[in-house]
Amino acid sequence: MKLGEKIKFLRRGKNISQEELAAMLKINRNYLSRIETGKSDPTASVLKNIAKLFNVDLNSLLDINDADIENCNKIKYIVENCKYLNEKDLDFIVRIMTVMREEYVKINTNID
């Protein structure tokens, strides 16, 4: 379910109109409508307030799971530590990643 659909589902589950929710969030009703239809993205503060109003975890609202967070942490770790490598080592890492990506594409597109 997309973010806007989730927000609409939560709102309807509590029998709250768009006008009422917009007033609670201190946003324009048209903006809320665009969020629910996927035409606009909510700001971080609006998302935080929606999660708080409906007593839902922000990560679940955004479909962020622990694996995603762990992967982001791994990427940050790699990036942070690459700054300590010399050019030769960086080139080596780039070559490894290129080969890995090519293999990933092969496997996921069934190309031999």
Image (cartoon, helix red, strand yellow):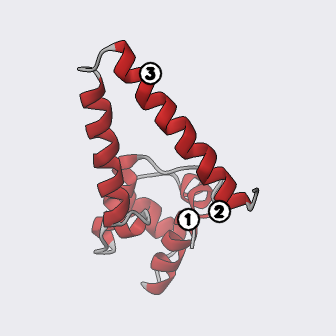
Res 91 label: 3
Query: What amino acid is at disc 1?
Result: Gly
Query: What x and y, as percent, mark residue 91?
Result: 44, 21
Query: What x and y, as percent, mark residue 68?
Result: 38, 59
Tell me the residue at 45%/52% (across/down).
27
Res 37 label: 2
Q: Is residue 72 left or right of residue 6?
A: left
Spatial separation of the CA atoms under disc 3 and disc 1: 42 Å
Q: Is residue 85 left or right of residue 38?
A: left
Q: Badge 1: few (under 14), some or many (20 or more) residues near its Cα, within 10 Å?
A: many
Query: What x and y, as percent, mark residue 24?
Result: 37, 63
**Vertically, is 105 above or below 95?**
below
Q: Residue furthest right?
A: 111
Q: Is residue 111 left or right of residue 90?
A: right
**Vertically, is 10 above or below 95?**
below
Query: What amino acid is at disc 3?
Result: Asp
Query: Which quadrant of the rendered structure holds the N terminus?
Result: bottom right
Q: Name the residue tied to disc 1.
A: 4
Q: Is residue 48 left or right of residue 102?
A: left
Q: Badge 2: few (under 14), some or many (20 or more) residues near its Cα, within 10 Å?
A: some
Which label's residue is closer to the chain start, 3 or 1?
A: 1
- Tag 2's secondary structure? loop
2 and 3 marks in contact (CB < 8 Å):
no
**Which image quarter: residue 79?**
top left
**Which image quarter: residue 36?**
bottom right
Which label's residue is closer to the chain start, 2 or 1?
A: 1
Which label's residue is closer to the chain start, 2 or 3?
A: 2
Q: Nearer the viewer, residue 2 or 7?
A: 2
2 and 1 marks in contact (CB < 8 Å):
yes
- Tag 1's secondary structure? helix
Tell me the residue at 24%/29% (across/down).
81
- Tag 3's secondary structure? helix
